[in-house]
Image (tube, helix red, strand yellow):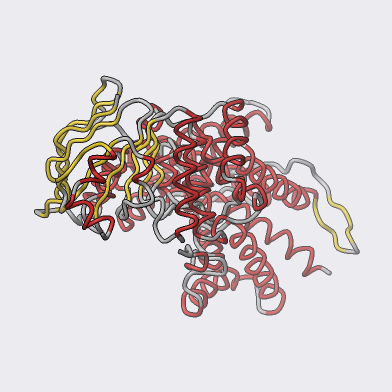
């Protein structure tokens, strides 16, 4: 259903993504693991199309020259050079790194803005689901986005992305900076979303441990290249992965 | 009493002049320096429709507003879109458009006191012993209505909410399927129409002259800088501060110091609090 082939991204002459290929089937959860600066966010931006906007803005301002190569196929269509809003319309929704909640809007408004692409009945139904799976949001619907704790913000960010009716949800470091207890809750919620809402999910994370139990397939990114890939068990048994990402 | 009543009227006028500018800047980070020109242009279009085509006042005002919206959209789509992301070029390009419109109008014969829009209702009324003409009263009522309508629009409609999202985080809005260029077109069109509304209610108080185009731009910029660029509450507060300050100077120093007040307000704000009253200081920066 979703396939990226030979993605290359250069910041000037620095290679940020080196020939990365990745696949995600219908209703699969795919994990992308890698350390800081391994290229996770660059990959997510490229998949969601935000990279095109970054390229354009950098060029306009005369700053870095960014080059993007490769192909991204979504339901049999090459979407490599489609605008992010067009990809979102097709169902590819990014939940960006560091959450990027609208700080001056209330929780409810954030969710409403998320439902820009949804019909009124879809929005109502999804809102009910979001408040069910992220119950803590229910009590703080009137609070401003900027005054939420990290965990609440992350729930809101995922909820906001869900409101846009994704078919493929891209989660960029959803567990960043959160306590282990909330990490556990969130990864359980991600699995619940896949099971009950029927969507494919690609999730990138620095630490594999909380995410790996819920994935179907995973990739390890190092210096911009996908060095290891495999099913959940395969990754867990791989000795290199074990030492680097599980700390055993 | 006079100071209070005329202060309120003046403040609302300033808020009306500035609200379009704030909206465009807030949504797309685009300082629309053609704002004053659009203001005069709408007035002139209304005058043309009324006097050359003989349409009735309300109808010509509505047609002129529609045209202004189209001009705003075209301005963004044809010119400004090419210089997005280069702040200096954005200012130069939009100011050039404004100059072209204003000086074009001057060249086309728009000068002197011959071009006037009639007030909606003649006459005046006594409020607490101060005589206020109906047009000025109407400015206040319409100003409040516009602000209310805008508030409802932004908080309750899909496009309004999308504009609000864009204003806070453009890329996050993009990930949700909001097309930033289309929203910027919408914002510019609405911004220009708001300038037009201001023109239609304020111009009957004087005559349509090119100079007031520049003056409106200065006022709008002053209000936005004092209030904090892109902040709506800030803009309204600033409109009241500058509005009352102007009336006080008129009463105690003299009418020709009015513009000085606005410029002085810019300078003082930039020195003491560069991001304005409600500027986007990173006060709400995310807590990780």
Residue at (49% x, 45% y) in the render: B38
Q: Nearer the viewer, residue B88 or B173?
A: B173
Residue B79: quadrant of the picture: top left
Residue B50 visible in this rendered orientation of the protein: no
Q: Residue at x 48, y 69 (%)?
A: B275
Exactly how many numbered labels are in the figure? 0
Q: Is residue A131 above or below residue A64?
A: above
Question: Would you place residue B282 above or below residue B160 in this image?
Answer: below
Left or right, B184 with respect to B129, comes to left
Quadrant location of the N terminus of chain B? Answer: bottom right
In the rendered structure, the answer to whether residue A65 lies left or right of residue B89 reads left
As drawn, A190 above or below A149: above
Whether residue A1 is visible: yes
- Front residue of this view, candidates A193 and B211: A193
Q: Please tell me which residue lies in front, B126 or B228.
A: B228
Residue shown at 47% from the left, 74% from the top:
B270
**Figure check: B205 above or below B223:** above
Q: Position of residue B266 (x, y in %)?
A: 50, 71
Q: Nearer the viewer, residue B70 or A195?
A: A195
Q: Position of residue B183 (x, y in %)?
A: 45, 39
Q: Specify the farthest residue to the top.
A: A76
x, y percentage for residue B44?
A: 54, 40
- Residue lying furthest left: A13
Instruction: Examine the image and state in which quarter residue A86 appears.
Output: top left
Specify the quadrant that holds the C terminus of chain B.
bottom left
Residue at 77%, 70% (x, y): give it.
B3
């Amino acid at each position: 259903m979703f396939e990226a082939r030979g993605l290359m991204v250069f910041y000037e002459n620095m290679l940020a993504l080196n020939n990365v290929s990745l696949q995600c089937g219908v209703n699969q959860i795919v994990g992308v693991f890698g350390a800081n600066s391994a290229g996770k966010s660059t990959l997510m931006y490229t998949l969601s199309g935000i990279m095109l906007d970054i390229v354009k803005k950098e060029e306009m301002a005369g700053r870095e020259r960014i080059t993007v190569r490769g192909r991204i196929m979504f339901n049999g269509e090459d979407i490599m050079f489609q605008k992010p809003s067009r990809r979102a319309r097709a169902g590819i929704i990014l939940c960006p790194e560091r959450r990027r909640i609208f700080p001056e809007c209330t929780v409810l408004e954030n969710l409403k803005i998320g439902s820009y692409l949804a019909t009124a009945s879809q929005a109502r139904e999804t809102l009910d689901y979001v408040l069910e799976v992220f119950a803590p949001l229910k009590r703080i619907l009137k609070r401003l986005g900027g005054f939420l704790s990290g965990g609440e913000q992350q729930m809101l960010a995922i909820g906001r992305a869900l409101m846009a009716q994704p078919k493929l949800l891209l989660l960029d470091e959803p567990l960043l900076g959160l306590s282990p207890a909330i990490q556990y809750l969130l990864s359980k919620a991600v699995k619940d979303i896949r099971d009950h809402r029927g969507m494919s999910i690609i999730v990138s994370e620095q630490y594999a441990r909380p995410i790996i139990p819920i994935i179907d397939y995973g990739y390890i990114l190092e210096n911009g290249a996908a060095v290891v890939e495999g099913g959940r068990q395969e990754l867990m048994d791989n000795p290199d992965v074990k030492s680097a990402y599980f700390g055993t | 009493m006079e100071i209070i009543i005329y202060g309120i009227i003046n403040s609302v006028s300033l808020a009306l002049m500035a609200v379009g500018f704030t909206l465009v800047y807030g949504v797309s980070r685009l300082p629309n320096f053609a704002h004053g020109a659009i203001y005069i242009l709408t007035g002139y279009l209304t005058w043309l429709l009324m006097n050359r085509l003989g349409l009735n006042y309300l109808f010509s005002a509505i047609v002129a507003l529609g045209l202004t919206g189209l001009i705003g959209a075209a301005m963004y789509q044809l010119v400004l879109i090419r210089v997005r992301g280069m702040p200096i070029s954005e200012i130069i390009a939009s100011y050039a458009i404004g100059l072209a419109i204003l000086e074009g109008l001057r060249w086309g014969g728009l000068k002197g006191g011959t071009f006037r829009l009639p007030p909606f209702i003649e006459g005046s009324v006594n409020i607490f012993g101060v005589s206020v003409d109906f047009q000025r009263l109407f400015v206040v009522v319409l100003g409040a209505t516009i602000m209310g309508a805008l508030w409802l629009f932004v908080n309750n409609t899909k496009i309004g909410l999308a504009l609000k999202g864009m204003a806070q985080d453009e890329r996050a809005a993009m990930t949700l399927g909001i097309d930033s260029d289309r929203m910027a077109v919408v914002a510019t069109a609405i911004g220009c129409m708001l300038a037009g509304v201001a023109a239609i209610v304020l111009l009957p108080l004087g005559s349509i002259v090119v100079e007031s185009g520049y003056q409106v731009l200065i006022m709008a910029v002053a209000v936005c800088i004092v209030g904090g660029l892109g902040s709506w509450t800030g803009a309204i507060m600033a409109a009241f501060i500058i509005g009352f300050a102007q009336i006080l100077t008129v009463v105690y120093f003299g009418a020709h110091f009015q513009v000085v007040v606005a410029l002085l307000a810019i300078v003082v704000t930039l020195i003491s609090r560069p991001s304005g009253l409600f500027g986007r200081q990173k006060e709400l920066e995310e807590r990780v």
